[in-house]
Image (tube, helix red, strand yellow):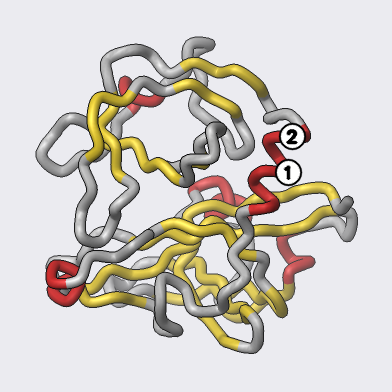
Amino acid sequence: MAGLRTDGGGWIRPVAPSEDGTLIGKHYILNHGFEPQILDLIRIEVSRAEPQPHQPENWVIGETQWELLERPASPAHIEQLVRSIEADSALFGDYGDRLDFDLLCKTPAPRSLCIVQPQDLKWRITTSIRGFRQTRAAFRLSGRSYDLSVTDPIWETRLARLAYGIHDLESADCPDSVRLLFTISLGEPLPSDKQCYKLVAGVILLPHT
């Protein structure tokens, strides 16, 4: 869970005041009783910055309940999001699907969140190394190819009806009238290989302008 600050300060990833920083329901349920949605404008109290080698945007949340201000955010705030679309095809500095955590401990990542507009997008349904169904997005950025795991829970559910294999964008019932963007996040290092994988953490649909 992450978002762009409205003051132009870039990205913020809220984390819990616990050892692993994992947010649970009591932390992020909004003042009207529901969970945050993509394109919400919300107010969050934070107590301190807590950057990590792989996630420099982390901030520890305070005790105040999160407040919904706008749903969806105003056109001005949407335009701020659009202006943040990443033009560089090298995600977090390279063209692979992961970064080595030990190397990040020596040279921390300057960022671990970005928004991109994928090209030639295909949905790929496969099996993870743990033997579970996995939803992936295969796409290109300025001629470079990526194949990343999709962790957006809404879109995992939306694509759950797809059979194993490769599917066009239209398989997700995306109308031609919308513009599809991805929020890419650098994940936690896996205990098995100490790699931080690049993830499609959010899928954003905007009307074409």
Task: Tell me: residue 1, above or below residue 74.
Answer: below
Give the SS element for disc 1: helix
Tell me if mark 2 has few (under 14), some (14-19) or many (20+) residues whose alpha carbon lies within 10 angstroms of its own.
few
Task: Tell me: residue 129, above or below residue 71.
Answer: below
Task: Tell me: residue 114, above or below residue 1.
Answer: below
Which residue type carries mark 2? Ala
Q: Residue at x 63, y 81 (%)?
A: 140
Is 133 left, or right, of 41 in this rendering?
Answer: left
Report x, y in % for residue 9.
47, 41
Report x, y in % for residue 50.
21, 41
Report x, y in % for residue 160.
57, 58
Which residue type carries mark 1? Glu
Determine which of the numbered discs, if any, sits on residue 196 in the image: none
Are circles 1 and 2 on residues that touch, CB within 8 Å? yes
Is 163 left, or right, of 47 in this rendering?
Answer: right
Residue 170 lies in quadrant: bottom right
CA gap between label 1 and label 2 equals 5 Å
Q: Name the residue under label 2.
A: 76
Q: Residue at x 63, y 37 (%)?
A: 39
Outermost residue toward the left in this view: 19
Tell me if mark 1 has few (under 14), some (14-19) or many (20+) residues whose alpha carbon lies within 10 angstroms of its own.
few
Is 9 left, or right, of 18 in this rendering?
Answer: right
Report x, y in % for residue 99.
29, 75
Q: Which residue is drawn at 26% across and 61% down?
A: 54
Give the SS element for disc 2: helix
Residue 171 lies in quadrant: bottom right
Which image quadrant: the N terminus?
Answer: top left
Camera-nearest residue between 188 and 90: 90
Camera-nearest residue between 151 and 69: 69
Residue 107 lies in quadrant: bottom left
Q: Name the residue under label 1.
A: 79
